[in-house]
Image (tube, rainbow, N blue to C red):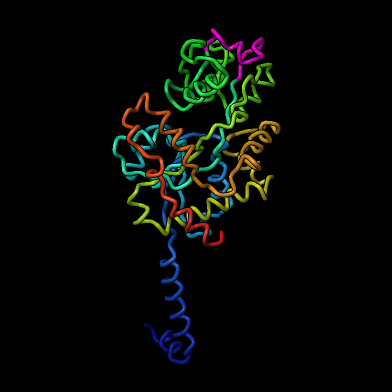
């Protein structure tokens, strides 16, 4: 310490206070380092809105979380969860259930948009469901969730999905839109926003699956069972922020629409409005509880391709403690 500094320190007792406060501030900052959480959504669509909104509105940050959102499509997302590369998966449940049937130690902690938000859209000239007989209908993959829904719907309408139509696997939503436009398929199953886009081009929604009121689970959140104990506090914080995102969807429609437009790269106001409509209001649960009946339906849908799924009890795949703890404490 040079002479001038020594003289200042001796004559200025305040320097001790300043130095002490400085050390306290540094210690407090390092003690408040945000908890890292890697979260994957397995598709890009409006149903991811609560997750995107919680991120963009700073709700995770407010809870002291550093949430990294990672898009990993399909089965690789489940593999990443099992291996620990991600901490939480926000996705439709079927790939996770398949992994559970194979012994994976995963568990569902919440579910949102538990409604069958799909439409079957057909080429011009097909106006009624019975006109689908003998036609080719596009799905994502054989025996996946879209195929399961098609079979349920046709059965409800008195048709045989194995005999009255021919299904072909054409891929994701965008691939199915292209297959319909090109004439490769006569009809396909799509979300409402894509259905609206096609309707503007003269295509026809012949079946609104939501009107049939099937019990379903929507986008579920899965974690490793070990994380429920080892990272409980962090998961509760995440769930509080996520619920806050759900509430903002209703309370801040304009912000929600901006977030949808950003992540879905939308410019058409009518398409943005439609995306917001079926991801808000009565379409959105007040809290992301898991309906056991819907989960049982999902498990049963997998048995033809994953026989071991018949050994699963839907109730044993659910852990409600994270959601319950988040609901006991007010969202910040």
Direction left: furthest residue: 103
Image location (x, y in percent) of residue 204: 66, 18
In this rendering, position of residue 104 left or right of residue 270: left
Q: Is residue 30 above or below residue 37?
A: below
Residue 240 belongs to the span the image colors magenta: no
Question: Which quadrant of the figure has residue 156?
Answer: top right
Picture residue at 46% right of the left edge, 41% below the top: 292
Q: Is residue 165 above or below residue 239?
A: above
Which range of residues does the magenta coloring cover?
A: 121-136
Question: Which quadrant of the figure has residue 40?
Answer: top left
Picture residue at 63% right of the left edge, 19% below the top: 206
Image location (x, y in percent) of residue 89: 43, 42
Direction top: furthest residue: 134
Q: Quadrant of the N terminus?
A: bottom left
In the depicted view, which residue is nearer to us: 1 or 186?
186
Picture residue at 56% right of the left edge, 35% below the top: 115
In this rendering, position of residue 118 left or right of residue 270: left
Image location (x, y in percent) of residue 255: 66, 46
Looking at the rendered structure, the number of numbered marks drawn on it comes to 0
In this rendering, position of residue 218 left or right of residue 202: left
Residue 123 belongs to the span the image colors magenta: yes
């Amino acid at each position: 310490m040079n002479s001038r500094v020594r003289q200042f320190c001796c004559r200025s007792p305040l320097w001790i206070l300043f130095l002490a406060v400085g050390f306290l501030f540094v210690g407090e900052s390092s003690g408040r380092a945000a908890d890292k959480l890697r979260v994957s959504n397995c598709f890009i669509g409006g149903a991811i809105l609560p997750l995107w909104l919680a991120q963009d509105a700073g709700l995770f940050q407010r809870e002291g979380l550093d949430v990294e959102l990672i898009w990993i499509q399909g089965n690789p997302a489940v593999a990443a969860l099992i291996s620990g590369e991600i901490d939480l998966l926000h996705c439709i449940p079927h790939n996770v259930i398949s992994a559970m049937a194979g012994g994976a130690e995963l568990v569902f902690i919440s579910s949102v948009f538990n409604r069958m938000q799909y439409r079957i859209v057909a080429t011009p000239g097909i106006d009624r469901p019975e006109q689908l007989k003998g036609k080719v209908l596009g799905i994502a993959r054989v025996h996946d969730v879209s195929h399961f829904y098609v079979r349920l719907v046709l059965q409800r309408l008195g048709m045989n999905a194995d005999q009255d139509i021919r299904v072909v696997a054409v891929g994701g939503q965008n691939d199915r839109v292209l297959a319909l436009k090109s004439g490769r398929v006569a009809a396909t199953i799509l979300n409402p926003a894509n259905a609206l886009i096609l309707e503007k081009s003269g295509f026809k929604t012949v079946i609104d699956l939501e009107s049939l009121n099937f019990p379903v689970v929507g986008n579920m959140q899965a974690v490793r069972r070990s994380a429920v104990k080892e990272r409980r506090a962090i998961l509760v914080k995440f769930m509080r922020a996520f619920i806050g995102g759900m509430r903002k969807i209703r309370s801040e429609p304009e912000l929600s629409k901006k977030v949808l437009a950003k992540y879905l790269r939308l410019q058409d106001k009518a398409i943005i409005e439609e995306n917001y409509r079926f991801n808000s209001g009565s379409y959105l649960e007040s809290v992301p509880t898991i309906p056991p009946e819907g989960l049982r339906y999902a498990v049963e849908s997998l048995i033809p391709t994953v026989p071991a799924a018949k050994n699963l009890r839907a109730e044993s795949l659910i852990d409600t403690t994270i959601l319950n703890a988040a609901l006991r404490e007010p969202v910040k």
